Amino acid sequence: MTSPPVFSTVLGRDLRLAARRRVDALLPLAFFAVAVSLFPLGVGPEPNTLRQISPGVLWVCALLAAMLSVTQLYANDQADGSLEQMLLAGGSAFSAGIAVALAKAVSHWLVTGLPLVLIAPLFGVMFDLSGRSIAALCASLALGTPILSLLGNVGAALTLGVRNGSVLLILLIVPLCIPALIFGSGAISAVESGSSARGHFSLLGALFIATGLLAPLATAAALRIAIE
Amino acid sequence: MGGYGLYVWGSYGVIAACIAIDALIAIKRHRAARATTAANGENG
Amino acid sequence: MATTRHFFTFASPARFYALAGALIPWFWIAALVLGAAGLWIGFFQAPTDATQGDAYRIIFIHVPAAWMSMVLYLVMAFWAAIGWAFNARLASMVARALAPTGAMFTFCALWSGALWGKPTWGTWWVWDARLTSELILLFLYLGYMALVNAIDDTRRADQAGALLAVIGSVNVPIIYFSVKWWNTLHQGATISATAAPKMVASMLTAMLLMTLACWAYAFAVVFTRTRAIIVEREREAKWLNEGAAA
């Protein structure tokens, strides 16, 4: 009865804030573009090499872009006190926490993850990936970036208000993202080399579901720890 | 060690050093903590 | 009533301090004796391997270190979770005391794995499933230590660390599975860099003794570190200033 309003309120608020600060919202995308472009410069322009490393490069840069942009999720709200208000709303503190966590993850994905999925084809072309591979790229990022947003959320809540929180967050959360990275980039490589990516996508999908169910719980618990 | 001495002793040597360092740091930490508490106790 | 009190008696930091202090010397002695026995059997009784020569003897420290690194992580997560769930201070302290030793064992497993890989497989590092998972485990340990150290509020640090350790424990099988998957797909590194030779009884005995030695050592050091943490945290407690048992 009271949880849906918390979710939609927080989500709507975050999206409106992101719309007002469009430059801030686009920074992770700019980071992604710059980071991806570094690899050919560092590795050399040989097309075969680039094609081979591109799934990993694109995925790693997406992962880093997601992690770097997730620290601000809660910091501003905690600074002005609205985070506590959000958590107090709703029937029980825990369900409010889950609603807030889900709303934050969804808003982060809509602002950072979804645009990444949409511009990824551009970079697929830069790395000379085939059409089918680019489709696989978009599909794997579409499944993977929500996972990154959900896990990043847990990290942001855990490191809320902590010194060097953003760097610490990367150290904490990146190991947890490794399975998604492996299955996600593996799917693209499989399609590129002509074999089936069904196993990869199944596992990635399973990760997506498991993370979607469990990460908000962990985030809610972390928020409770941070706020008390 | 049949020519593999570098590897075998390199492994055991470094590990022995790690174990010694781990233990010594723990012991020193304990001693320092007791010393600080004793000092505080005299002042407090 | 009396038995319940007895069971939880050592949950009090003061009593744990005394008990641990009495036990630590015995753990050290056990570690040294078991370690000496294990190494003696491993180096003087176990035969030379046909394919790997004497290089395989690294196994007697590599495997116990790897086991300890994994077990200590789970034990750490367990005690941290207990400390969080029951607000038990001592449990949280033990968890913090476990982390550095666990990380050390992980490093030792990686180091010995690398030095074993070089003579047997030709390279210092191979991205095989087990070594890569060990490396990720090291990152999990470092993350835990970084988090609890970064948060100044002790209770919040303990709780956040517990949550992180539990999340890590849940993820360890997933990470291991995905790394194994990744490794078998990329055919280049399918051969495990740390394949064990055919095990003879003496080799198994040596490994078992070395594992027990590592356990005893871990108890000794973790208990010492826990005592240090107890002193650091319970500075104001009267019993310590009144000169309790050393």
Image (tube, coloured by chain):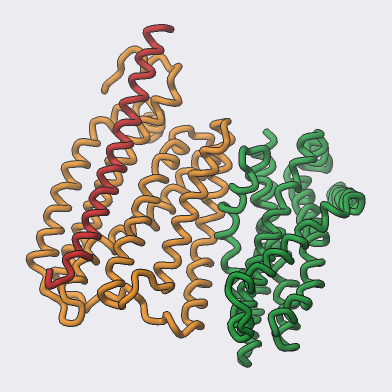
Chain colours: A green, B red, C orange
Corner quadrant of residue C45:
bottom left
Corner quadrant of residue C128:
bottom left
Q: Which residue is located at x 70 percent, y 84 percent? A: A128
Q: Which residue is located at x 73 percent, y 45 percent? A: A94
Q: Can residue A199 be seen?
A: no
Residue A35, image x, y percentages: 68, 64
Please tell me which residue lies in front, A195 or C16: A195
Is C182 on the left or on the right of C244, as rendered? right
Q: Which residue is located at x 67 percent, y 56 percent? A: A67
Question: Quadrant of the image for the C terminus of chain A?
Answer: top right
Is C200 on the left or on the right of C243, as rendered? left
Is A226 on the left or on the right of C131, as rendered? right
Please tell me which residue lies in front, A184 or A4: A184
Check the image and report above or below for C148 versus A146: above
Check the image and report above or below for A6 versus A215: above
Residue B27, image x, y percentages: 29, 33
Q: Which residue is located at x 63 percent, y 92 percent? A: A194
**Residue reaching furthest bottom?**
A194
